[in-house]
Amino acid sequence: MASLLRHLEDDGGGANVRVLADDARPLVDALPDGSLERVFVLHPDPWPKRRHHFRRLIQHASIARFHDLLVPGGELRIATDDPAYLGWILARVTAHPGLRWTGRRMADWRTRPDDWPETRYEAKARREGRPPAYLRFVKQ
Ligand SMILES: C[S@@+](CC[C@H](N)C(=O)[O-])C[C@H]1O[C@@H](n2cnc3c(N)ncnc32)[C@H](O)[C@@H]1O
């Protein structure tokens, strides 16, 4: 959080940025429907043990919530470097009838689009030989 605030100050931007150093879920629940053009979920914790899967951020209910938050044509973007979580995410988002996955070829989800920020976790995953998947879903 301190690093983010320093970057905002150094870049002279930040006038339209709001930060929350807390559990993001109550905020997600409180935002009005149809209020966001994009939602980024970048490298959510994979919780690899089966008994912890209920803790994963990506669930059918959270996908439905992200869908409702988006404007028509808005995008849900999710990145992960965890192959097992990737399958879990794809199964849950593609089960939602209101979201369409834009991926057609491997390059579509193995290449980070220019308008997609690289995160610190992503850079570390790459260095350690775990290439991330970049998933884009459009609200119908
Ligand atoms: C693997 S890290 C990725 C961090 C960052 N997105 C990146 O890509 O560099 C997962 C992050 O999610 C945060 N996190 C997990 N559950 C959260 C929640 N309910 N609300 C806000 N942050 C959460 C954790 O604190 C952790 O910083």
Image: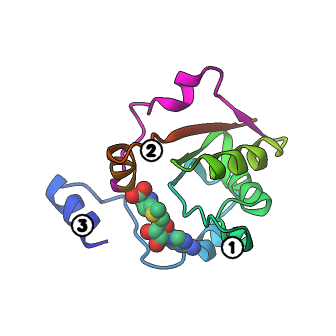
CA–CA distance between discs 3 and 2?
Answer: 25 Å
Would you say residue 101 sits in the magenta stretch?
yes
Looking at numbered disc 1 in the image, what kind of residue is underneath it? Answer: His
Q: Secondary structure at mark 1?
A: helix
Disc number for residue 52: 1
The picture quadrant where one finds residue 94 is top right
Q: Secondary structure at mark 3?
A: helix
Q: Earlier in the sequence, mark 1 or mark 2?
A: 1
Looking at numbered disc 2 in the image, what kind of residue is underneath it? Answer: Arg
CA–CA distance between discs 1 and 2?
Answer: 22 Å
Q: Which residue shows up at 74% across the image and 61% down it?
A: 59
The picture quadrant where one finds residue 108 is top right
Disc number for residue 3: 3
Answer whether residue 24 is visible to the viewer in this image.
Answer: no
Q: Secondary structure at mark 2?
A: loop
Disc number for residue 130: 2
Above-or-below relation of 47 to 139: below
Q: Quadrant of the N terminus?
A: bottom left
CA–CA distance between discs 3 and 1?
Answer: 30 Å
